[in-house]
Amino acid sequence: MEHIVTVQDAVTAFAPWMEPTAVELDAIDREMPVILADVELLDAHIVTLDRTPSELDERRIRRARRRALAARVALVNRAAGTSLHGGAA
């Protein structure tokens, strides 16, 4: 009979005492508008899974897609703005 054992590193890798660092929390805060916009887009798609999308559903999906794209553009623009040093190009 063989015994099944767990790998100790894999078990303790997610111990409750391991918390995200301040840098990781800041990154999550910066990305939160993108995360929320993606959740809204996913919600819009989920609503239409069991039925044919109505005109209202299609508008909701388009609006959510535009918001998600705008949030991603804003995040990229903020990241580009913080990494540029000096005056106007």
Image: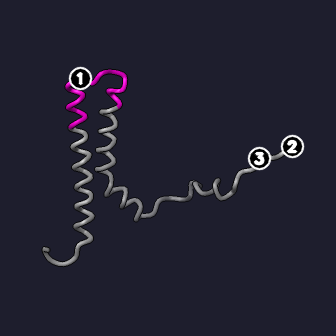
Q: Secondary structure at mark 1?
A: loop
Q: Quadrant of residue 65?
A: top left
| Mark 3 surroundings within 10 Å by alpha-carbon count, few (fewer than 14), some (14 through 19), many (20 or more) | few
Residue 75 magenta-drawn?
no
Q: Quadrant of residue 46?
A: top left
Q: Is 49 displayed left or right of 88 in the figure?
A: right
From this view, report whether residue 41 is shown above or below residue 16. Answer: above
Q: Which residue is mark 1?
A: 54
| Type of amino acid under label 1 | Ser
From this view, report whether residue 74 is shown above or below residue 37. Answer: below
Residue 50 magenta-drawn?
yes
Which is nearer the eye, 85 or 22?
Answer: 85
Q: Which residue is mark 3?
A: 4
Say which residue appears at 21% left-offset and 43% top-offset.
Answer: 66
Q: Which residue is mark 2?
A: 1
Real-space Cα distance between discs 3 and 1? 53 Å
- Count of numbered circles on the image: 3
Q: Which portion, as a residue range, is magenta? A: 46-62
Q: In the image, residue 67 lies at what x, y percent?
A: 22, 44
Q: In the image, residue 87 lies at what x, y percent?
A: 14, 77
Say which residue appears at 20% left-offset and 26% top-offset.
Answer: 56
Q: Which quarter of the image is occupied by the N terminus?
A: top right
Q: In the image, residue 50 lies at what x, y percent?
A: 37, 22
Q: Earlier in the sequence, mark 1 or mark 2?
A: 2
Q: Secondary structure at mark 3?
A: loop
* Disc assigned to residue 18: none
